[in-house]
Amino acid sequence: MKLGLKIDVDTYRGTKLGVPRLVELLRKHEAGATFLFSLGPDHTGRAVKRVFRRGFFGKVARTSVLKHYGFRTLLYGTLLPGPDIGRACAAEMRAARDAGFEVGIHAWDHVKWQDGVAGADAAWTERQMRLAHERFAEIFGTPARVHGAAGWQMNVHAYRLTQRLGFHYASDTRGTGPFIPIHRAEIVACPQIPTTLPTLDELVGLDGATAANVAERVLALTAAPPAHPHVYTLHAELEGLKLAPVFEQLLAGWRAQGYELVALGDICQALDPRRLPRCNVALAPVPGRAGTLAVQGKPFLA
């Protein structure tokens, strides 16, 4: 049984501090993973300021946001200029690749994408994706093979660009298993490998889940052999820092359950795109998250 690990890296701090810690943990447990990087400016402060004002942060208490992201990070894009993550952290990104991990694109500007892509036009969407695409090639010397949208936020132009920009596959959605996305009867020839499991920040605070017992909640969801490989999304800012002990419990627990912990590319290599189901992509709420996310919908023409 394979379980894919997808690591979203949102911020300068997550890249500089969280990524090296995760590389260490993953190598210790002989686990593969896919690191998806934010490659442009860090404007986290704008997003967190809005989150505090609206009163939500997934299910993580607002009082713990400072612990997760760090005080300085909360100032980026507000009182301090947002650092250029790709320029400042290229060495950490390449070190993850050099350690044997798959690397790909999360976003150019994580905050701008998550807040703006749902209503964005083709020109705005293409500019954001091409900026990330070009910076990735500049850092790694090769085009990116995988795209995983910030906040699981997409639009039709972004789906089309996953195909036009030559990604081998994408992980932009939540769902139950690999599929070919269909948007309003339009086939997008870039397979989706969706996140199948809830994230820690969605679970903590829900039905009594705490940092002390949340690993047990996740492991209960993976106890039975799945019909399709599970994909777990973690964040360099959480599992790479404050919640690293929880992630280590998950790694050990999955090993005990018999899983091979792999990069998403390893799951992709085992797929035959001709045999994948064609499913509509939709927007839907996910417990523990505000708003709606891109999700795997019903099979096309079912």
Image (cartoon, rainbow, N blue to C red):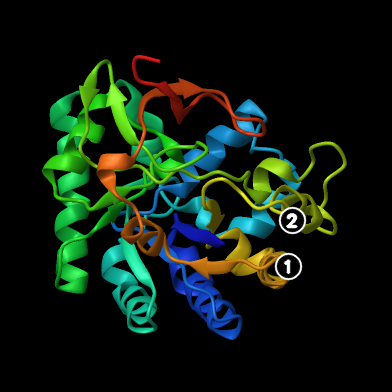
Residue 219: numbered disc: 2
Q: CA distance from mark 1 to mark 2?
A: 7 Å
Q: Is residue 291 above or below residue 89?
A: above
Residue at 32%, 71% in the rendered image: 88
Pointer 1 or 2: first along the chain = 2
Residue found 58% across the figure and 35% down from its top:
51
Where's the C terminus, which quadrant? top left
Answer with the quarter of the image where residue 97 lies: bottom left
Please name the residue shown 25% across and 41% down the image: 274
The mark tally for this picture is 2
Q: Amino acid at mark 2?
A: Leu
Q: Position of residue 238 (x, y in %)?
A: 61, 59
- Residue 180's place in the image compared with 168, above or below, is above
On the question of residue 240 being in view, the answer is yes
Q: Which of 283 and 180 lies nearest the eye of the viewer?
A: 180
Task: Point out residue 263 in the picture as x, y percentages from the top left corner.
Answer: 43, 65
Q: Eyeballing the image, is 74 above or below 287?
A: below
Height in image: 197 above or below 247? above
Viewer-closest of 74 and 172: 172
- What amino acid does circle 1 point to? Gly
Residue 57 placement, left or right of 36: right
Q: Which mark is residue 253?
A: 1
Give yes or no for contact between labels 1 and 2 (Cβ–Cβ under 8 Å): yes
Circle 2 sits in a helix, a strand or a loop, which is it? helix
Relative to 247, 126 lies left or right: left
Q: Is residue 94 left or right of residue 99?
A: left
Point out the image quarter for the N terminus.
bottom right
Residue 280, picture quadrant: top left
- Label ID, residue 67: none
Q: Position of residue 125 (x, y in %)?
A: 21, 34
Which element is circle 1 on? helix
Q: Farthest residue in the front direction?
A: 275
